[in-house]
């Protein structure tokens, strides 16, 4: 089907999938931002420090438990025939779950000792223990969602994600606000919701599986997926490394404020998640059906960057007004952290937008070197800067490590999967973004809503200028007319 479509149609297909996924992600993850003021009534910054450490551990374990096998499902799904596909899925899923369950049992035995050495301000039982089992159950959900994504069943995946958000929101609000269980209630809500959905998705996966498989069904997927394990592990470890150093040098209150600032940064990152969720299956299918993928990849990646840039600008400019709206002085210190979190996530998101290529060329063996180099730089920078500069030192270290990682990944991706470079157009986008943000953060008005209106107008002006700069007036008009005719 992709082989006969015009590039405008393909771009429309990618963006339509991203809109569906993105809409669901905005509703779910964005929903957590709007629920924050409710949790603020019962949770202190110290409580958020505990939650941040526990959820950081869960992020690391998500990568460890998966073994990169749901990535293999996405990459090979369209290459397997209808007879062998259920056997491949069964082999990969059962291998991943057996491994994950084994790690959980080991951590039940050694967790108190291990995590007491890692964190002094968060205990293994019950906080980190709940995060461990939440990661195990989440791995089942990730596996089935990978199948939905590669089949391009965006609406179905979005409905499930929305229901998962609603379930977790209801449980955590009840346990924190109704039962007054503090951070334990929050993490227990995450655990109960993950367990319930894991049972549902396990039933769904059974219908996708054929249990008569052999070791051969694991060979190619493991060869592709196992190099992704250290990538996911190192990346997620880098994501929790800041909590490790902050735990040693700053108060739990500062870690809590840092965690909330991170949530606002993730409000931007949810846009990248929505795009990436559509982007990867789109590229993998494109690579099996067309020969002009390098040219299309170069052009479509600019649209990806454009959407990310506008989203980052909006979050940076409007986060201050959002926090002012709720007026809880305990959390005003978060305002100064938000732009730096958004910058870190923006740099990291360039890896998805501009750094795809090693996976398309099936050259994932060298990919872990990128994550390892980034992690080493992060450890060195954290150890030097966090003791002196606290949370700002951690943010600076994350930014430097992200820059190195993205630069290496883009270079290797272009090496293994050459495509035209859009460098000059990127420079134009970034210059325009910096100018607009510079003006936007200087808008100070006694009226909150006037401030929001002025900043939204600036972002809209930026969108028009960036589209014209990237496509040019004539090509922009052609694309718009094409989409209007199809609509």
Image: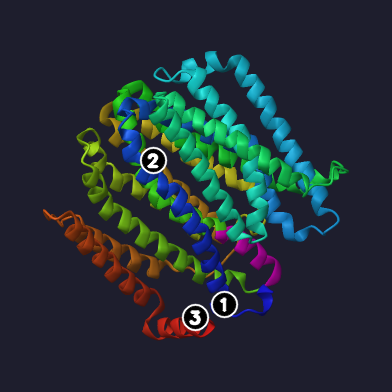
The disc at residue 398 is 2
Expressed as whole percent of the image width and height from the top left, the position of residue 94 reads 76, 38
Specify the farthest residue to the left.
Answer: 446
Q: Is residue 107 above or below residue 256?
A: above
Res. 37 image quadrant: top left
Q: Decide if residue 274 is on the left or right side of residue 2.
A: left
Query: Which of disc 2 and disc 1 is earlier in sequence?
Result: 1
Q: Position of residue 64 (x, y in %)?
A: 61, 34
Which residue corresponds to mark 3?
Answer: 483
Does the magenta run of residues contain 378? Answer: no
Of labels 3 and 2, earlier in sequence is 2
Residue at point 37% right, 45% down?
Answer: 33
Foreground tag (3 vs 2): 3
Residue corresponding to mark 1: 9
Disc 3 packing (10 Å; few <14; some 14–19; many ≥20): few
Which type of secondary structure does the marked residue at label 2 adopt?
Answer: helix
- CA gap between label 3 and label 2 equals 40 Å
The residue nearer to you, when weighing 342 against 314, is 314
Q: Secondary structure at mark 1?
A: helix
Residue placed at 47% from the left, 83% from the top?
484
* Helix, strand or loop for the magenta stretch, by majority: helix
Could you tell me how many numbered marks the image carries?
3
The CA distance from mark 3 to mark 1 is 8 Å
Residue range in magenta is 278-290
Residue at (59, 54) in percent of width and height: 157
Task: Please tell me how crowded label 2 is: few (under 14), some (14-19), or many (20+) other residues with Cα within 10 Å.
Answer: many
1 vs 2, front mark: 1
Q: Is residue 427 above or below residue 270?
A: below
Check the picture and name the quadrant holding the N terminus.
bottom right
Residue 405 placement (x, y as % from top left): 47, 47
Which residue does the image show at 59% across and 28% down from the upper left? Answer: 133
């Amino acid at each position: 089907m992709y082989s006969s479509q015009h590039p405008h149609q393909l771009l429309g297909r990618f963006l339509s999938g991203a809109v569906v996924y993105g809409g669901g992600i905005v509703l779910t993850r964005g929903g957590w931002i709007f629920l924050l003021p409710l949790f603020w009534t019962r949770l202190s910054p110290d409580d958020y420090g505990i939650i941040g450490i526990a959820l950081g551990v869960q992020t690391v374990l998500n990568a460890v438990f998966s073994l990169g096998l749901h990535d293999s499902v996405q990459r090979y799904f369209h290459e397997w025939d209808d007879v062998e596909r259920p056997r491949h899925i069964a082999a990969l899923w059962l291998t991943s779950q057996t491994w994950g369950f084994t790690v959980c049992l080991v951590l039940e035995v050694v967790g108190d000792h291990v995590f007491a050495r890692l964190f002094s301000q968060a205990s293994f039982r019950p906080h980190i223990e709940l995060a461990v089992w939440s990661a195990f159950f989440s791995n089942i959900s990730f596996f089935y969602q990978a199948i939905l994504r590669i089949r391009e069943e965006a609406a179905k995946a979005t409905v499930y994600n929305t229901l998962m958000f609603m379930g977790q929101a209801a449980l955590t609000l009840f346990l924190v606000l109704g039962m007054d269980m503090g951070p334990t209630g929050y993490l227990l809500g995450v655990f109960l919701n993950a367990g319930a959905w894991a049972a549902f998705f396990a039933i769904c996966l059974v219908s996708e599986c054929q249990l008569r498989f052999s070791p051969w069904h694991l060979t190619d997927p493991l060869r592709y997926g196992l190099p992704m394990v250290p990538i996911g592990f190192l990346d997620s470890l880098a994501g929790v490394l800041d909590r490790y150093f902050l735990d040693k040098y700053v108060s739990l209150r500062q870690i809590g404020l840092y965690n909330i600032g991170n949530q606002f940064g993730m409000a931007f990152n949810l846009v990248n998640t929505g795009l990436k969720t559509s982007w990867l299956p789109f590229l993998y299918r494109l690579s099996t059906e067309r020969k002009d993928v390098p040219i299309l990849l170069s052009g479509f990646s600019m649209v990806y960057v454009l959407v990310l840039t506008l989203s980052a600008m909006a979050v940076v400019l409007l986060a201050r007004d959002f926090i002012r709206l709720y007026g809880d002085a305990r959390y005003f210190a978060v305002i100064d952290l938000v732009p730096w979190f958004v910058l870190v996530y923006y740099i990291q998101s360039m890896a998805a937008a501009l750094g795809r290529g090693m996976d398309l060329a099936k050259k994932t063996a060298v990919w872990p070197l990128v994550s390892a180099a980034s992690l080493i730089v992060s450890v060195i920078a954290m150890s030097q800067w966090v003791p002196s500069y606290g949370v700002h030192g951690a943010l600076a270290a994350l930014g430097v490590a992200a820059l190195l990682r993205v630069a290496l990944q883009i270079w290797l991706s272009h090496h293994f999967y050459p495509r035209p470079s859009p460098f000059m157009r990127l420079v134009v986008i970034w210059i325009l973004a910096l100018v607009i943000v510079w003006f936007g953060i200087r808008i100070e008005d006694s009226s909150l809503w006037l401030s929001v209106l002025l900043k939204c107008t600036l972002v809209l002006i930026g969108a028009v200028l960036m589209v014209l700069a990237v496509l040019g007036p004539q090509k922009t008009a052609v694309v718009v007319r094409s989409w209007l005719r199809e609509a």
